[in-house]
Image: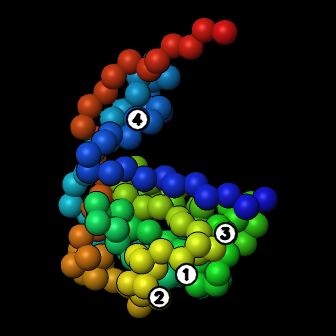
Amino acid sequence: MSALILLVLSPMSMLAMASPQSVNNVTLYGPEQLDSQVSNVFLGCLNNTGVDYNIYVDDIGITVVVPTANRDVDFDGEDQGLFQCIIDVNLRMQVAAESTVYSRDENENTAPSISITHEWLIEQGALGNTPIGVRPAMKYTA
């Protein structure tokens, strides 16, 4: 199954995720400077998946991972490792995966993930995430 899942947070929005402390509350996340430990964990994980990727940082600070081959991202197949890497840093780093099936201008500005460093990400404008508040979870009725 091919899928494109973006697990991202833009600087103009907030990501709401369930807090493990209480299912009745949702933690809100906002942008912050990318922490070197977080980016190094992500890059180390990504480069140990056994799959080659390229990376670029979009204009709102999201680190975008794209396959080197012209293909969709497949989190149920060869990109399972990428999915786990994203999960590992999702609360601390703005990161997304993107298909390379349809060419986009940003894809021309990619670099091989093996050559990416924390410093390169910062120079490109990559952002991290930080908790900025808590709100009650929405209640759904059937």
Q: Determine whether label 1 and label 4 are within 8 Å by CB.
A: no
For marks 4 and 2, the one nearer the N-term is 4
**Amino acid at circle 3:** Asp
How many angstroms separate mark 4 from mark 2 (CA)?
A: 31 Å
Q: Residue at x 38, y 84 (%)?
A: 109
What residue is pinned by disc 4? 16
Q: Which of 22 and 30 is in front in this view?
A: 30
**Amino acid at circle 1:** Tyr
For marks 4 and 3, the one nearer the N-term is 4
Q: Which residue lies furthest to the right in this view?
A: 1
What residue is pinned by disc 2? 112
How many angstroms separate mark 1 from mark 2 (CA)?
A: 6 Å
| Disc number for residue 66 | none
How many angstroms separate mark 1 from mark 4 (CA)?
A: 28 Å
In the displayed structure, does residue 55 sit left or right of residue 120? right
Q: Which residue is drawn at 58% across and 84% down?
A: 68
What residue is pinned by disc 1? 53
Q: Which of 91 and 65 is in front in this view?
A: 65
For marks 3 and 1, the one nearer the N-term is 1
What residue is pinned by disc 3? 72
- Dot 4 falls on a residue whose secondary structure is strand
Q: Which residue is drawn at 32% across and 51% down?
A: 10
For marks 2 and 3, the one nearer the N-term is 3
**Residue 32 rendering spot, x and y as whole percentages:** 22, 54
**Amino acid at circle 2:** Pro
Q: Where is the C terminus found, in terms of image quarters?
A: top right
